[in-house]
Amino acid sequence: MTEFGRRGVLLGSAGALALPWVAKAQAAGVKIGLVAVQTGPAASLGTHLKDGFMQGLKHLDGKLGGLAASVVDIDDELRPEVAVTKVRAALERDKVDFVVGVVFSNILQAIIRPVTESGTMLISTNAGPSTFAGAGCNPNLFVTSYSNDQVHSVMGEAAERNGYKKVFALVPNYQAGKDAVAGFKSRFKGEVVDEVYVPLNQLDFSAELAKIAAARPDAIFTFMPGGLGVNLVRQYRAAGLAHIPFLSTFTVDESTLPAQQDAALGFFSACPWAPNMDNAANRRFVRDFEAAHNYVPGSYAAQSYDAAMLLDSAIRKVGGNLANKAALRAAIKAADFRSVRGPFKFGANHYPVQDFWLCKVVKRADGKFATETVRKVLENDTDPYASACKM
Amino acid sequence: MSTQLLLIQALNGLQFGVLLFLVAAGLTLVFGVMDFINLAHGVQYMLGAYLGASFAAATGSFWLALLLALPVALLAGLALEWLVFRHLYARDHLAQVLATFGVILSLNQLVRMVWGSAPLQVPVPALLEGGIQLMPGLTWPTYRAAILLAGLATAGLLWLVVERTRLGALVRAGASNAPMVAALGVDIHRLFMLVFGCGAMLAGFAGVMAAPILSVEPGMGDTVLILAFVVIVIGGIGSVRGAFIAALLVGLIETLGRSLMPDLMRLFLAPSPARQTGAALASMLVYVAMAGILAWRPRGLFPVRAG
């Protein structure tokens, strides 16, 4: 062995000796990879999500369970392949301890394997596809939002209880749109007089509005996320159809209301949370969030705030020891924190078991638009897939 | 479906077509006269909508906003021309597509930085609130009638300028043979700049007009741009008359297709698959029509004669 080579080996072993120190230095803090879309038309949802989580950290003085928390921002760009690359980098280079966030199900679907197979816990604060709720459930995945189909079925239940007989369904022509109609129908026993599927990039709804007027339904059910919903709501109001109850999911919420404003007043949505919910945790969250960000938080923000509180409780429970995954998992599963929704617990599939509400768009005294709870529709609801989950 | 509903859908189709024409008119002028593929036309439309929204919020008046947004949209267009586009006229179409696509990405991001990513809204002006009762329970908003009129007026004005003035003669000549026009002593660069400015202003105008009925958000121009390209290809590139006819055609096919296809499919299929295939077919219809027209008349319905 040459002198040079020997020195190399010595240096190498010195490096190896130093490694436990590196690991120890990392254990002093907790690193979160926060996946939130920041580009493209859905960026405002990512902003809600991120601001909500950061608000949680702020309330916890920048610590999670006593450990100083640092956040690695991951913009998934709403492109699965980008999300996978960036999340892999966060896992391997930044050595994040948790991956939190994700607005859209297709992004969750893309990153779930790289994250959970590395033994890292994944906390989805919005996307809740049925894929991972039933037979495909994953011990390292926790969802703080809901199972997607649950929300649509809540609206079906609300329509059923209101005694509507004829409902007109209007959704975008893709998988989530079809799931929305199926979810709605799972609890609505009346007649769905027509189901209209529109392209995802639809701008003008006048053809559909004329059809609705001709069909004279008791109510319409719609799922039009983002800009689609902005266009539909304003055109629906302008066409003089607002006397037909507007039952919706993910169509009128705090992310779209600034653009819908008066046009959405009195329109309904199904929700697990609304800014007006009367409990101490929620009052504090909404008040401080609005003061810091100057907009009304939506469910994306609330569920992410909850995720911060959830992690805080879990890390505290395990005494800051993130290495024992089984203990950590049990601590998260315990969900021993004050949710802004009031009662909150995880089901066997790590999706929440929670109450669902019928919500309505109101104009608050300060002139801002928000959703408000009207009445509880489902209590302690477990999503329909949970029984198929064997963990 | 009743005749009444069919007529209403036709009216909706015409109105959507006119909105498309407002966007496509500028695009076809620039593409036709300058042989320049401007993918950024859509973001100029978006810029118009954002300017309209900002000015409306600041002044409280839609009309003032419209008045202010137009010159700013024009200036923004000229600035883009000066900064980026004029260096591309001599390049091939691929370079133009790449560069203007870059402009789309940058401007979409810039808009997000300035205005945020949440959609904005522009209230319908008080003068045009309300609507006309078309059938029991359905009103046709007055504002849509205003769009229809604005589009028809724009079409008339453009026709007058292009067909009846000296400037229009130069534009038409430029569309059919630019080097020859330059050889005859016309400052072709000034002409190009003028045409480009008009195109940008038309796009901005369309954006402001669309803002009260459509969501103002980053990327809103991209969807419209695709349809606008279909319109100018069907109409014949460079032809304002062609763009007008084609825009109405596309508007009608879009709207009627969406309302009739699912019902038509029900003749052959069970209700549930009929709805979904009907919807899928309806969204393809415009492109099928474009392919059909191109097979029949490869240069569009009203080709601008060259050479």
Image (cartoon, coloured by chain):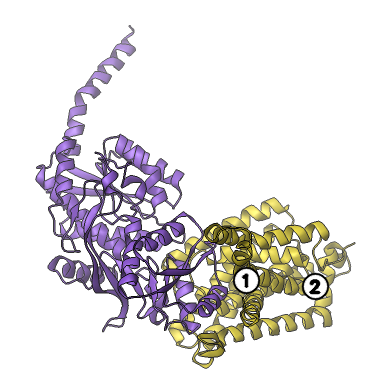
x 9%, y 42%: residue: A319
x 21%, y 54%: residue: A308
The answer to which image quadrant residue A62 occupies is bottom left
Marks 2 and 1 sit apart, C-alpha to C-alpha, by 33 Å
Give the colour in which the image draws chain B: yellow
Q: Nearer the viewer, residue B73 or B291?
A: B291
x 33%, y 6%: residue: A1
Where the N terminus of chain B falls, by quadrant? Answer: bottom right
Nearest to viewer (mark 2 / mark 1): 1
| First in sequence: mark 2 vs mark 1 | 2
Q: Which residue is mark 1?
A: B255
Q: Pointer 2 indicates a residue of which chain?
A: B
Residue B171, horizontal then vertical, whole percent: 80, 72
How many numbered circles are shown? 2
Q: Amino acid at mark 2?
A: Val
- Mark 1 residue element: helix
Q: Nearer the viewer, residue B111 or A173?
A: A173
Q: Pointer 1 indicates a residue of which chain?
A: B
Give the colour in which the image draws chain A: purple
Residue A209, horizontal then vertical, whole percent: 52, 76
Estimate how packed mark 2 is, as few (under 14), some (14 to 19) or many (20 or more) residues with alpha carbons within 10 Å: many
Q: Please tell me whether residue B25 is drawn above or below residue A126 in the rendered image.
A: below
Q: Which residue is mark 2?
A: B171
Q: Are marks 2 and 1 in contact (CB under 8 Å)?
A: no
- Mark 2 residue element: helix
Q: Are marks 2 and 1 on the same chain?
A: yes
Left or right, B304 with respect to B90, comes to right
